[in-house]
Image (cartoon, rainbow, N blue to C red):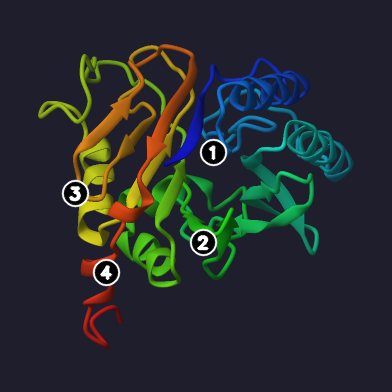
């Protein structure tokens, strides 16, 4: 079994508060025996594209924040998958930083498929990476990618990912569905999409959002058959802990895709 933690935390009150909250959650995840903890999309410094009052991106501040969180990963001996931003050649990207349990930077996964609302703020990345977790393999797709572009998940699974992590951010809309359970029929399609991504690829799928009251999505872990292993009640802050049997991630359906069908 591989234990993971999803940091279903409130939207940070400020960029500095996001770092403080992330470091605290890393310690909590380690104390719970998790080998990995994953944070929502752009948790550091906060997701700005929907109009939250997040200060303009500062490359010096971001570098310092990443350094602090990498140090916390090393201190607590846990892999950290951090939803964040980064500058590449002077352009801002939505990204995920992966810090190893020794505090090293294992790599980055930039958001390739931007939501249309993000086009004016960010530059898209390119390529799909996978990462090592004590001999197992995981990949990352970010928000809109996993909801709207199934190809992104299949690309990670095709490269060996047994687990695909899905940091995302969504918030309640006026007059929207008020969820009481996971993937309810009256809700938006988004939580049902998470179940599809797992079942169509026969991989584990772990999706993580901020804890927002009446948000249409919450954090959940979906088994390779598409069943919901566990989910965090909508709006309830805290770590969602799950033990994954990675032998169930056969990836069989993903690997049966005939050549040329994905193009």
Residue labelled with disc 4: 254
The label nearer to you, 4 versus 2, is: 4
Residue labelled with disc 3: 225
> Which mark, residue 213?
none
Q: Where does the image place residue 120, in percent across and percent down from the top left?
A: 58, 50
Label 4–label 3 contact, CB within 8 A: no
Number of residues whose C-alpha sits closer than 10 Å to that of mark 1, classed few (under 14), some (14–19) or many (20 or more): many
Number of residues whose C-alpha sits closer than 10 Å to that of mark 3, classed few (under 14), some (14–19) or many (20 or more): some
Circle nearer the N terminus (4, 3)? 3
**Residue drawn where x is 21% and y is 84% of the image:** 258
Give the alpha-carbon distance from disc 4 to disc 3, as whole Å.
13 Å
The label nearer to you, 3 versus 2, is: 3
Number of residues whose C-alpha sits closer than 10 Å to that of mark 4, classed few (under 14), some (14–19) or many (20 or more): some
Badge 3 element: loop
**Residue drawn where x is 20% and y is 40% of the image:** 192
Q: Nearer the viewer, residue 43 or 59?
A: 43
**Residue drawn where x is 25% and y is 58% of the image:** 202
Q: Where does the image place residue 173, in percent across and percent down from the top left?
A: 34, 21
Q: Is residue 259 above or below residue 243?
A: below
Give the alpha-carbon distance from disc 1 to disc 2, as whole Å.
13 Å
Q: Quadrant for the C terminus, please.
A: bottom left
**Residue drawn where x is 78% and y is 32% of the image:** 72
Q: Quadrant for the N terminus, please.
A: top left
Q: Is residue 105 above or below residue 50?
A: below
Residue labelled with disc 2: 112
Circle nearer the N terminus (1, 3)? 1
């Amino acid at each position: 079994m591989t234990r993971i933690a999803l940091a279903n935390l409130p939207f940070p009150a400020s960029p500095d508060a996001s770092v403080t909250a992330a470091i605290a959650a890393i310690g909590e995840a380690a104390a719970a025996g998790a080998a990995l903890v994953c944070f929502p999309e752009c948790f550091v410094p906060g997701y700005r594209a929907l109009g939250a009052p997040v200060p303009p991106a500062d490359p010096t501040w971001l570098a310092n924040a990443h350094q602090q969180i990498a140090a916390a990963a090393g201190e607590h001996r846990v892999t950290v998958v951090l939803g964040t931003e980064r500058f590449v050649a002077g352009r801002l990207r939505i990204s995920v930083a992966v810090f190893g349990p020794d505090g090293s930077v294992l790599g980055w996964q930039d958001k390739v498929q931007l939501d249309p609302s993000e086009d004016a703020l960010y530059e898209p990345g390119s390529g799909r990476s996978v990462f090592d977790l004590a001999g197992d393999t995981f990949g990352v797709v970010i928000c809109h990618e996993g909801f709207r572009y199934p190809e992104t998940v299949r690309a990670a699974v095709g490269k060996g990912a047994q687990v695909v992590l899905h940091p995302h951010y969504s918030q309640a809309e006026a007059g929207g569905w008020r969820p009481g359970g996971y993937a309810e029929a009256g809700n938006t399609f988004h939580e049902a999409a998470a179940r599809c991504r797992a079942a169509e690829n026969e991989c584990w799928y772990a999706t993580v959002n901020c804890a927002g009251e009446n948000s249409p999505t919450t954090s959940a872990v979906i088994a390779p058959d598409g069943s919901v292993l566990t989910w965090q009640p909508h709006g309830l802050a805290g770590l969602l802990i799950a033990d994954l049997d990675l032998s169930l991630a056969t990836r069989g359906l993903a690997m049966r895709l005939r050549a040329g069908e994905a193009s």
